[in-house]
Amino acid sequence: MTDEGRGAAEPVDGVLAALADPTRRQLLDLLAEQGEATATTLAERLPVSRQAVVKHLAVLDGAGLVTAARVGREVRYAVRPAALDATARWMAALATDWDRRLATIKRLAEAAERDAR
Amino acid sequence: MTDEGRGAAEPVDGVLAALADPTRRQLLDLLAEQGEATATTLAERLPVSRQAVVKHLAVLDGAGLVTAARVGREVRYAVRPAALDATARWMAALATDWDRRLATIKRLAEAAERDAR
DNA sequence: TCGACGTGCAACTCTGGAGTTGCACACATT
DNA sequence: AATGTGTGCAACTCCAGAGTTGCACGTCGA
């Protein structure tokens, strides 16, 4: 097991930043739906220009959420579940940690109250 | 108007937007660590002003990631795991869905290749 | 009652990111 | 060779949000 839950969350922060934008999430939805697509194709299905899509795809690629594969003169993008899954696990672990801490706090508070009486 | 299949504007997008900022994540770490804290106290442990912290806490509160409780003249904030856990589950489900779709695509591609031979 | 402390509100500045347009280059098809 | 189509690069505009400062209001202890 690698130590998680501490501050060192490098991949996670890129993923979170990437997912924060609704256009990028929509892009991911389209990609997951089609399996593979080019920036030009994707731009046709979105209310933004191709260049905007290209930039978003670059961010998603940087976060490891998509892969880019050159085929002839076009670049085909596809979704990449690993980074998303890793972030999901990180969040779940964090939520569990919070729960644990809150339970401890509550227990201590109740003990203190018993002492006060 | 838009056809994004995800029905209502889920709490997820608020959580993702909130988690996108590193200062807010740091704030959540501090809160989880201390259990409870005020904006003034938290600001002392961060390189930003109290007002900045207050704004961040407002965002986190809006995303359901923290709770605010007034105690006398101060406001105590605490971490709230539910929203985080829900988002983690959403992401995990999405990753699984991507995996499923990719497996299908791969299967179809292999079948097509067999036909081509 | 008075001062100290914490909070709330408002009016700013400023940078990053989302989006655009225009053009040049690369690769196919005829 | 000529043309159409998809990418890549660069120089913009624009605005949401991260951060600041200043001051007024409420609350607690002396």
Image (spheres, coloured by chain):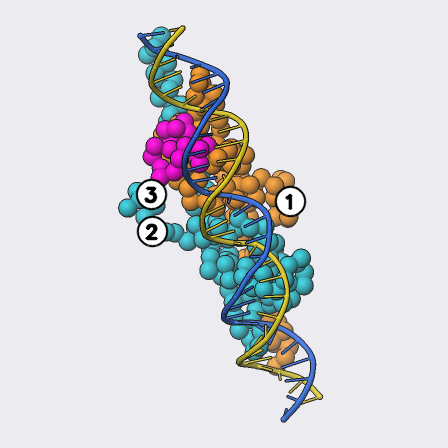
Chain colours: A orange, B cyan, C blue, D yellow
- The answer to whether tags 2 and 3 share a subunit is yes
What's the residue at 47%, 36% (across, down)? A56
**Relative to A101, is A12 above or below?**
above
Secondary structure state at the residue bearing disc 3: loop
Q: Which chain is mark 2 on?
A: B
Judge the density around disc 2: few (<14), some (14-19), many (≥20) Cα neighbours within 10 Å. Answer: few
> Which picture quadrant has residue B105?
top left
Examine the rendering and report whether any part of residue B112 can be seen.
Answer: yes
Residue drawn at x 51%, y 64% as measured from the top left: B67
Q: Can you identify the residue that label 1 sits on?
A: A8
Q: Which residue is mark 3?
A: B4
**x and y percentages locating residue A113 in the rendered image:** 60, 76
Quarter holding the C terminus of chain A? bottom right
Do callouts 1 and 2 mark residues in contact (Cβ within 8 Å)? no
Pinpoint the chain carrying mark 1: A
**Where residue A85 sits in the image (x, y, percent)?**
50, 39
Q: Chain of mark 3?
A: B
Given the image, on which type of amino acid does mark 2 rest? Ala
- The label nearer to you, 1 versus 3, is 3
Estimate the x, y position of residue A32 in percent, counting from the top left.
Answer: 39, 33
Query: Where are the magenta residues, as a range?
Result: A38-54
A51 part of magenta stretch: yes
Q: Is residue A33 visible?
A: no
x, y percent for residue C23: 46, 25
The N terminus of chain A sits in image quarter: top right
Which residue is tagged 2?
B8
Q: Tell me: residue B113, above or below residue A29.
A: above
